[in-house]
Image (spheres, rainbow, N blue to C red):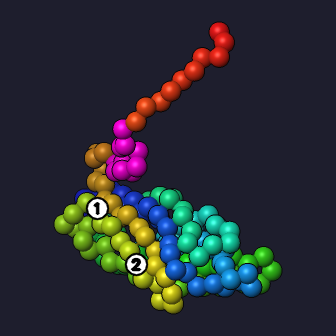
């Protein structure tokens, strides 16, 4: 528990969000908070099913970082008025004390859910690699002129 390292949170997507705008959609972004440190995602316009695929990191000891829950709040970005909350989720990180990775489908307090991949990497270990990057394939290169 005293091991130092990083918690990586990949904010994948959300589904079934509450519509906050007159067009029946929202302009969602997420704020992730852990141990007093916040990260904010990009805003995805006019959707109730945003895909972010953004990764955020918190550094510290495993014990400290898992002693409180990760707070995920999704907001609707507004141009003129204050941004509306679309819901909050609290994600326990205690499982990371036993396993290095946790897949989470967190229900929001109002409507919808958020998909996360949470991993722990101790200092000196190789950080996690997104499984999508591990797919095999081919790259075709065509030389037009030399």
Is residue 63 on the magenta stretch? no
Q: Which mark is residue 101?
A: 1
Magenta-colored span:
127-136
Q: Secondary structure at mark 2?
A: strand
Q: Which mark is residue 106?
A: 2
Q: Secondary structure at mark 1?
A: strand
C-alpha span from label 2 to label 1: 15 Å
Q: Quadrant of residue 126?
A: top left
**Quadrant the C terminus occupies:** top right
Furthest-left residue in this view: 98
- Residue at 38% in and 64% down: 117
Does residue 141 show up? yes
User: Residue 59's spot in the image, x, y percent?
Assistant: 40, 60
Along the viewing direction, whichever of 105 and 98 lies nearer the viewer: 105
Along the viewing direction, whichever of 76 and 36 lies nearer the viewer: 76
Furthest-right residue in this view: 80
- Residue at 28% in and 47% down: 125
Q: Earlier in the sequence, mark 2 or mark 1?
A: 1
- Residue at 50% in and 27% down: 140
Q: Which mark is residue 27?
A: none
**Quadrant the N terminus occupies:** bottom left
Q: Quadrant of residue 102?
A: bottom left
Residue 98 shown left or right of residue 113 in the figure = left
Along the viewing direction, whichever of 92 and 44 lies nearer the viewer: 44
- Seen in the picture, residue 146 relative to 79 is either above or below; the reply is above
User: Residue 8's spot in the image, x, y percent?
Assistant: 39, 59
User: Residue 46's spot in the image, x, y percent?
Assistant: 68, 72
Q: Residues within 10 Å of mark 1 (few under 14, many from 20)?
A: some
């Amino acid at each position: 528990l005293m091991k130092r390292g990083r918690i990586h949170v990949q904010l994948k997507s959300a589904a079934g969000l509450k519509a906050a705008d007159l067009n029946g959609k929202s302009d969602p972004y997420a704020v992730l908070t852990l141990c007093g440190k916040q990260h904010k995602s990009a805003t995805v316009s006019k959707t109730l099913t945003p895909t972010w695929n953004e990764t955020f990191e918190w550094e510290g000891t495993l014990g400290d970082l898992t002693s409180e829950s990760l707070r995920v709040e999704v907001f609707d970005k507004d141009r003129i008025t204050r941004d509306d909350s679309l819901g909050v989720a609290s994600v326990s990180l205690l499982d990371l004390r036993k396993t290095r990775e946790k897949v989470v489908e967190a229900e929001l307090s109002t409507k919808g859910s958020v998909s996360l991949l949470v991993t722990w990497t101790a200092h000196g270990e190789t950080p996690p690699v997104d499984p999508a990057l591990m797919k095999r394939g081919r790259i075709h290169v065509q030389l037009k002129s030399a």
